[in-house]
Amino acid sequence: MSQTISVPITDNVSDTLFIPLYMRSLETRRSAPVISDPLACELVECIDYDFTKYEKSSRSQLGTAIRIRCFDQAISDFVAAHDDPVVVSLGAGLDTRFQRVHKGKGVFYELDLPEVIEFRRQLIPESEKNPYIAMSMFDTAWIGEIRERHPDASFILVAEGVFMYFDEAQIKPLIVEIAEGFGQGGLHFDVSSPWAVRNSHRHDTVKKSKAVFKWGLEDDREIQNWSQNLRYTGTTRYFEHEKWRWGMMGVMGRVLPPLKNAFRMLHYEFTS
Protein backbone atom coordinates (compact mmCIF):
# COMPACT_ATOMS: atom_id res chain seq x y z
CA MET A 1 0.00 0.00 0.00
CA SER A 2 2.84 2.38 -0.79
CA GLN A 3 0.86 4.26 -3.43
CA THR A 4 -1.46 7.06 -2.31
CA ILE A 5 -5.02 6.50 -3.51
CA SER A 6 -7.34 9.39 -4.32
CA VAL A 7 -10.87 9.49 -2.92
CA PRO A 8 -13.76 9.13 -5.41
CA ILE A 9 -16.53 9.56 -2.79
CA THR A 10 -19.16 12.17 -3.70
CA ASP A 11 -21.99 11.29 -1.28
CA ASN A 12 -21.89 13.35 1.94
CA VAL A 13 -23.02 10.50 4.18
CA SER A 14 -20.57 8.08 2.56
CA ASP A 15 -17.78 10.57 3.23
CA THR A 16 -18.29 10.01 6.96
CA LEU A 17 -16.74 6.55 6.52
CA PHE A 18 -13.40 8.27 7.06
CA ILE A 19 -14.38 9.20 10.62
CA PRO A 20 -14.47 5.66 12.12
CA LEU A 21 -11.48 4.65 10.00
CA TYR A 22 -9.38 7.47 11.43
CA MET A 23 -10.70 6.94 14.96
CA ARG A 24 -9.69 3.26 14.76
CA SER A 25 -6.20 4.20 13.65
CA LEU A 26 -5.79 6.78 16.43
CA GLU A 27 -7.02 4.33 19.06
CA THR A 28 -4.74 1.57 17.79
CA ARG A 29 -1.72 3.85 18.24
CA ARG A 30 -2.46 4.40 21.94
CA SER A 31 -0.27 2.66 24.51
CA ALA A 32 -3.28 0.83 25.98
CA PRO A 33 -5.89 0.78 23.21
CA VAL A 34 -9.49 -0.40 23.57
CA ILE A 35 -9.14 -2.06 20.16
CA SER A 36 -6.30 -3.01 17.85
CA ASP A 37 -6.73 -2.42 14.14
CA PRO A 38 -3.35 -2.27 12.36
CA LEU A 39 -5.01 -2.33 8.93
CA ALA A 40 -6.84 0.90 9.74
CA CYS A 41 -3.45 2.53 10.36
CA GLU A 42 -2.18 1.28 7.00
CA LEU A 43 -5.26 2.54 5.17
CA VAL A 44 -5.01 6.03 6.66
CA GLU A 45 -1.41 6.24 5.48
CA CYS A 46 -2.22 5.37 1.88
CA ILE A 47 -5.42 7.41 1.31
CA ASP A 48 -5.18 10.94 -0.04
CA TYR A 49 -7.61 12.54 2.39
CA ASP A 50 -7.45 15.36 4.93
CA PHE A 51 -7.80 13.38 8.13
CA THR A 52 -6.37 16.26 10.18
CA LYS A 53 -9.81 17.89 10.45
CA TYR A 54 -10.82 15.02 12.72
CA GLU A 55 -7.82 15.30 15.02
CA LYS A 56 -8.44 16.00 18.71
CA SER A 57 -11.82 14.22 18.59
CA SER A 58 -11.21 12.22 21.73
CA ARG A 59 -14.89 11.53 22.44
CA SER A 60 -15.50 10.07 18.99
CA GLN A 61 -12.26 8.12 19.19
CA LEU A 62 -13.25 6.44 22.44
CA GLY A 63 -16.89 6.00 21.45
CA THR A 64 -15.94 4.40 18.15
CA ALA A 65 -13.54 2.03 19.88
CA ILE A 66 -16.14 0.97 22.46
CA ARG A 67 -18.75 0.42 19.75
CA ILE A 68 -16.37 -1.69 17.66
CA ARG A 69 -15.36 -3.82 20.64
CA CYS A 70 -19.01 -4.38 21.54
CA PHE A 71 -20.12 -5.31 18.02
CA ASP A 72 -17.01 -7.39 17.38
CA GLN A 73 -17.82 -9.43 20.48
CA ALA A 74 -21.49 -9.84 19.52
CA ILE A 75 -20.51 -11.10 16.10
CA SER A 76 -17.78 -13.37 17.43
CA ASP A 77 -20.27 -14.93 19.86
CA PHE A 78 -22.88 -15.35 17.12
CA VAL A 79 -20.44 -16.98 14.72
CA ALA A 80 -19.21 -19.37 17.39
CA ALA A 81 -22.76 -20.38 18.33
CA HIS A 82 -24.05 -21.19 14.82
CA ASP A 83 -23.08 -23.85 12.30
CA ASP A 84 -23.56 -21.72 9.17
CA PRO A 85 -23.23 -18.05 10.18
CA VAL A 86 -23.47 -15.12 7.78
CA VAL A 87 -22.52 -11.59 8.83
CA VAL A 88 -23.78 -8.55 6.89
CA SER A 89 -22.33 -5.07 7.47
CA LEU A 90 -24.64 -2.31 6.26
CA GLY A 91 -22.92 0.86 5.11
CA ALA A 92 -19.64 -0.99 5.54
CA GLY A 93 -17.39 1.79 4.28
CA LEU A 94 -13.80 0.78 5.03
CA ASP A 95 -14.67 -1.39 8.00
CA THR A 96 -12.14 -4.12 8.78
CA ARG A 97 -14.20 -6.42 10.98
CA PHE A 98 -13.48 -9.42 8.80
CA GLN A 99 -9.76 -8.92 9.36
CA ARG A 100 -10.28 -8.47 13.12
CA VAL A 101 -12.86 -11.16 13.82
CA HIS A 102 -12.89 -13.89 11.18
CA LYS A 103 -11.34 -17.14 12.39
CA GLY A 104 -12.12 -19.28 9.36
CA LYS A 105 -15.82 -19.74 10.06
CA GLY A 106 -18.68 -17.89 8.39
CA VAL A 107 -19.12 -15.49 5.48
CA PHE A 108 -18.83 -11.73 6.07
CA TYR A 109 -20.62 -9.49 3.55
CA GLU A 110 -19.77 -5.81 3.12
CA LEU A 111 -22.63 -3.77 1.63
CA ASP A 112 -22.37 -0.16 0.54
CA LEU A 113 -23.02 2.21 -2.35
CA PRO A 114 -21.26 1.35 -5.64
CA GLU A 115 -18.78 4.25 -5.37
CA VAL A 116 -17.79 3.14 -1.89
CA ILE A 117 -17.38 -0.51 -2.86
CA GLU A 118 -15.30 0.47 -5.89
CA PHE A 119 -13.04 2.50 -3.58
CA ARG A 120 -12.95 -0.32 -1.04
CA ARG A 121 -11.84 -2.82 -3.67
CA GLN A 122 -8.78 -0.67 -4.40
CA LEU A 123 -7.74 -0.89 -0.76
CA ILE A 124 -9.06 -4.17 0.64
CA PRO A 125 -9.44 -7.05 -1.82
CA GLU A 126 -12.60 -9.08 -1.39
CA SER A 127 -12.53 -12.84 -1.02
CA GLU A 128 -14.82 -15.82 -1.02
CA LYS A 129 -15.35 -15.45 2.72
CA ASN A 130 -15.54 -11.65 2.56
CA PRO A 131 -17.64 -10.70 -0.51
CA TYR A 132 -18.85 -7.20 -1.34
CA ILE A 133 -22.26 -6.00 -2.49
CA ALA A 134 -22.37 -2.68 -4.35
CA MET A 135 -25.89 -1.54 -3.62
CA SER A 136 -27.84 0.91 -1.48
CA MET A 137 -29.09 -0.77 1.68
CA PHE A 138 -32.51 0.66 0.84
CA ASP A 139 -32.59 -1.36 -2.38
CA THR A 140 -33.53 -4.45 -0.44
CA ALA A 141 -33.04 -6.86 -3.32
CA TRP A 142 -29.80 -7.73 -1.51
CA ILE A 143 -31.82 -9.53 1.16
CA GLY A 144 -33.20 -12.08 -1.29
CA GLU A 145 -29.82 -12.36 -3.00
CA ILE A 146 -28.05 -13.29 0.24
CA ARG A 147 -30.85 -15.62 1.34
CA GLU A 148 -30.66 -17.42 -1.99
CA ARG A 149 -26.92 -17.90 -1.63
CA HIS A 150 -27.27 -19.18 1.95
CA PRO A 151 -30.65 -20.90 2.32
CA ASP A 152 -29.71 -22.70 5.56
CA ALA A 153 -27.66 -19.99 7.23
CA SER A 154 -28.16 -17.97 10.40
CA PHE A 155 -27.76 -14.23 9.91
CA ILE A 156 -26.45 -11.35 11.97
CA LEU A 157 -26.51 -7.80 10.65
CA VAL A 158 -24.70 -4.76 11.96
CA ALA A 159 -24.93 -1.06 11.09
CA GLU A 160 -22.37 1.25 12.71
CA GLY A 161 -22.67 5.00 12.45
CA VAL A 162 -25.22 4.64 9.66
CA PHE A 163 -28.89 4.79 10.57
CA MET A 164 -28.86 8.22 12.25
CA TYR A 165 -28.03 9.91 8.92
CA PHE A 166 -31.39 8.92 7.42
CA ASP A 167 -35.05 9.65 8.11
CA GLU A 168 -37.21 7.20 10.02
CA ALA A 169 -39.36 6.92 6.88
CA GLN A 170 -36.35 5.23 5.26
CA ILE A 171 -35.06 3.28 8.26
CA LYS A 172 -38.35 1.75 9.42
CA PRO A 173 -39.21 -0.19 6.23
CA LEU A 174 -35.57 -1.30 5.94
CA ILE A 175 -35.54 -2.80 9.43
CA VAL A 176 -38.93 -4.43 8.86
CA GLU A 177 -37.75 -6.05 5.62
CA ILE A 178 -34.60 -7.30 7.34
CA ALA A 179 -36.60 -8.81 10.19
CA GLU A 180 -39.12 -10.45 7.90
CA GLY A 181 -36.67 -11.49 5.20
CA PHE A 182 -33.91 -13.26 7.11
CA GLY A 183 -35.73 -15.79 9.26
CA GLN A 184 -33.77 -16.02 12.51
CA GLY A 185 -30.83 -13.92 13.54
CA GLY A 186 -29.68 -10.69 15.11
CA LEU A 187 -29.52 -6.99 14.31
CA HIS A 188 -27.11 -4.61 16.06
CA PHE A 189 -26.94 -0.88 15.41
CA ASP A 190 -26.28 2.42 17.13
CA VAL A 191 -28.82 5.20 17.50
CA SER A 192 -29.00 8.83 18.54
CA SER A 193 -31.68 10.42 20.66
CA PRO A 194 -33.85 13.26 19.26
CA TRP A 195 -31.86 15.60 21.52
CA ALA A 196 -28.57 14.43 19.98
CA VAL A 197 -30.00 14.87 16.48
CA ARG A 198 -30.93 18.47 17.26
CA ASN A 199 -27.43 19.04 18.59
CA SER A 200 -25.45 17.17 15.92
CA HIS A 201 -23.84 20.49 14.93
CA ARG A 202 -21.95 20.21 18.23
CA HIS A 203 -20.72 16.64 17.65
CA ASP A 204 -16.92 16.67 17.66
CA THR A 205 -16.56 15.00 14.24
CA VAL A 206 -19.93 15.28 12.49
CA LYS A 207 -19.81 19.07 12.76
CA LYS A 208 -16.68 18.94 10.58
CA SER A 209 -18.40 16.89 7.86
CA LYS A 210 -21.12 17.78 5.36
CA ALA A 211 -23.54 15.21 6.78
CA VAL A 212 -26.17 15.72 9.49
CA PHE A 213 -28.07 13.44 11.83
CA LYS A 214 -31.74 12.98 10.92
CA TRP A 215 -33.19 10.08 12.90
CA GLY A 216 -33.52 10.13 16.65
CA LEU A 217 -35.04 7.35 18.74
CA GLU A 218 -36.50 7.97 22.19
CA ASP A 219 -37.63 4.49 23.26
CA ASP A 220 -35.26 1.57 22.66
CA ARG A 221 -38.15 -0.91 22.64
CA GLU A 222 -40.19 0.99 20.08
CA ILE A 223 -38.70 -0.84 17.12
CA GLN A 224 -40.06 -4.20 18.21
CA ASN A 225 -43.51 -2.74 17.54
CA TRP A 226 -42.61 -2.35 13.87
CA SER A 227 -42.75 -6.10 13.21
CA GLN A 228 -43.87 -9.17 15.12
CA ASN A 229 -40.56 -10.74 14.06
CA LEU A 230 -38.52 -8.24 16.11
CA ARG A 231 -37.56 -8.64 19.75
CA TYR A 232 -35.56 -6.14 21.75
CA THR A 233 -32.72 -7.82 23.68
CA GLY A 234 -30.78 -4.94 25.19
CA THR A 235 -29.00 -1.60 25.12
CA THR A 236 -25.31 -0.86 25.56
CA ARG A 237 -24.42 2.61 26.84
CA TYR A 238 -21.06 4.09 25.98
CA PHE A 239 -20.43 5.81 29.31
CA GLU A 240 -20.67 2.50 31.19
CA HIS A 241 -17.45 1.38 29.48
CA GLU A 242 -13.90 2.67 29.95
CA LYS A 243 -15.11 4.99 32.73
CA TRP A 244 -11.66 6.32 33.54
CA ARG A 245 -11.15 7.46 29.94
CA TRP A 246 -14.43 9.41 29.85
CA GLY A 247 -13.54 11.42 32.94
CA MET A 248 -16.09 14.03 34.03
CA MET A 249 -17.98 13.67 30.73
CA GLY A 250 -18.63 10.06 31.67
CA VAL A 251 -19.82 10.98 35.15
CA MET A 252 -22.36 13.38 33.67
CA GLY A 253 -23.24 10.88 30.95
CA ARG A 254 -24.15 8.25 33.50
CA VAL A 255 -26.38 10.63 35.45
CA LEU A 256 -27.92 13.20 33.12
CA PRO A 257 -30.61 11.70 30.84
CA PRO A 258 -29.86 13.88 27.78
CA LEU A 259 -26.22 12.72 27.73
CA LYS A 260 -26.98 9.19 28.92
CA ASN A 261 -29.39 8.58 26.05
CA ALA A 262 -27.68 10.69 23.38
CA PHE A 263 -25.85 7.76 21.78
CA ARG A 264 -26.31 4.07 22.49
CA MET A 265 -26.15 0.65 20.88
CA LEU A 266 -29.28 -1.45 20.44
CA HIS A 267 -29.50 -5.21 20.12
CA TYR A 268 -32.44 -6.97 18.50
CA GLU A 269 -33.30 -10.51 17.49
CA PHE A 270 -35.55 -11.41 14.60
CA THR A 271 -37.44 -14.65 14.27
CA SER A 272 -40.07 -15.76 11.79
Image (spheres, helix red, strand yellow):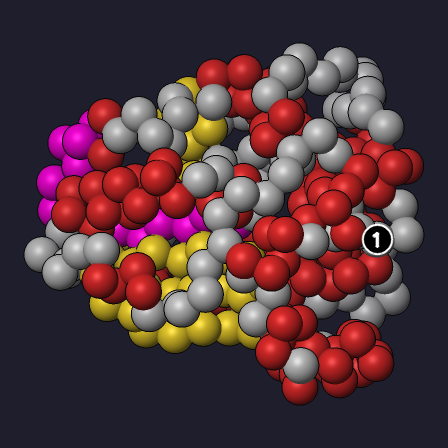
Vertical order, 207 against 271 (above or below): above
Q: Classify the position of the C terminus by image quarter.
A: bottom left
The answer to whether 261 appears left or right of 131 in the picture is right
Residue beneath the point at 59% across and 44% down: 213
Vertical order, 35 against 108 (above or below): below
Task: Give the amino acid type for the residue marked by disc 1 in the picture.
Answer: Ser
Task: Give 87 or 158, whichever is nearer the viewer.
Answer: 158
Q: Quadrant of residue 69?
A: bottom right
Residue beneath the point at 75% across and 84% down: 251
Vertical order, 250 against 7 (above or below): below
Q: Position of residue 179 (x, y in %)?
A: 21, 50
Residue beneath the point at 74% across and 34% down: 209
Pointer 1: what residue? 57
The answer to whether 153 appears left or right of 45 in the picture is left
Please tell me how crowded label 1 is: few (under 14), some (14-19), or many (20+) other residues with Cα within 10 Å. Answer: some
The secondary element bearing badge 1 is classed as loop
Q: Classify the position of the N terminus by image quarter.
A: top right
The segment highlighted magenta reads 144-160
Residue 36 shows in this picture: no
Is 150 in the magenta? yes
Q: Position of residue 73 (x, y in %)?
A: 49, 66
Q: Quadrant of residue 59?
A: bottom right
Residue 26 shows in this picture: yes
